[in-house]
Image: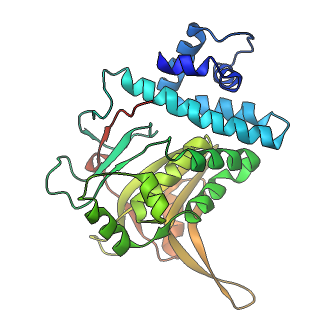
Amino acid sequence: MEAFERIKESPKRIYLVRAANAENAGGFLSEEEYSKFKTLYSANPLLAIQRMNSAIAAIGSEDAKKRYCDECVSLESAVEREIIESRGMRYGIETETRRGLPYFLFDGFVDMGYYSNEMNRTREKLLVDKKKLAKHLACAKAMSIMFPERSEAVMARMVAGRINYDKDIAERFVEEKDFGLIGLNEFLEEQIGVCRHFAMLYQLFAQEAGIESRIVKGYLGKRPDGGLHAWNMAHRDKNCFLVDTSGSYLQDNKDGSITRCIMFIQDSYEGRCYRKARAYGKQYRRHERNRNFYKYRYLEF
């Protein structure tokens, strides 16, 4: 277990593993402890992350919290890569094509869009490489710990502050890459993207915050054949949050000025969120989940 060998040498990672396991043991990390952690993470990664985030929140020093956030993201990436490797994969190899969208995006997730085969693609295969996204993910985790009651909205603002919507430039960038495998980190470096890049980035930030969220794909517009679109739906307690970080609306202020706001709607039911969105001129229509295709690609340690 290569991840275990790396984790057992780090006191911070040992602390986080034991927090996820809900244990207070001391001393060296045993293989049994790590196996329990990996089993939990494989079955319920969001619960493991929530427990680790709670343990980080209990640390007194703000600087120490940031260091633990960095270590936590590295730990998550390591165990996710080992889980993918345990399925008999080798570096660079992809799993078979699957339908739908998983509720949790593991390291190595590849969004295929509506294309089940490799030929005649008109968009990239979008790859999640968490090591290359680590500084953004650690920042999202730290901000969610700092603002736990407003983390859904804070994550949305973080996404909007890191990437700009520009369909023409994004499409040229994809074409220059021959519609191949492109990391989400590359779009962040270019600071450009379209709705799928925004939605995936929000999903990753939400996961780091321990927020139950999913990517939703469908159409946006009043016509039945409205343009393809992607957004997010998050849940906490009895609240639903419709989050469209690539969408916006204009808000009239009391002083006569106008503010462009992210489409962020909270209610107790998803249906009400969508009805509220129509008041802002946004008509979202979900399509069935099996319209999307995805794979996993094993990335080296």
Query: Quadrant of residue 32 in the image?
Result: top right
Q: Where is the C terminus found, in terms of image quarters?
A: top left
Most foreground residue, 21 or 238: 21
Residue at x 64% of width, y 22% of height: 17
Tell me which colouring the rendered structure shows. rainbow
Q: Which residue extends farthest right?
A: 60
Say whether residue 235 is visible.
Answer: no
Q: How many labels, in total? A: 0
Residue 224 vs 205, above or below: the answer is below
- Name the side, left or right, on which 73 lies relative to 101: right
Q: Is residue 264 left or right of residue 229?
A: right
Q: Quadrant of residue 54?
A: top right
Q: Residue at x 54, y 17 (%)?
A: 4
Task: From the top left corner, tell me how far across and down residue 174 is, in percent.
Answer: 30, 62
Q: Nearer the viewer, residue 59 or 248?
A: 59
Point out residue 41 in the picture as x, y percentages from the top left corner: 52, 25
Q: Position of residue 163 (x, y in %)?
A: 51, 65
Determine whether 169 is above or below 8 in the image: below
Q: Is residue 268 above or below residue 64?
A: below
Q: Is residue 273 above or below residue 104?
A: below
Percent of width and height locating residue 38: 52, 20
Q: Is residue 230 left or right of residue 67?
A: left
Residue drawn where x is 42% and y is 45% of the image:
128
71 left or right of 177?
A: right
Q: Residue at x 26, y 65 (%)?
A: 175
Residue 278 seen by the camera: yes
Q: Report the residue that reaches farthest toward the left.
A: 119
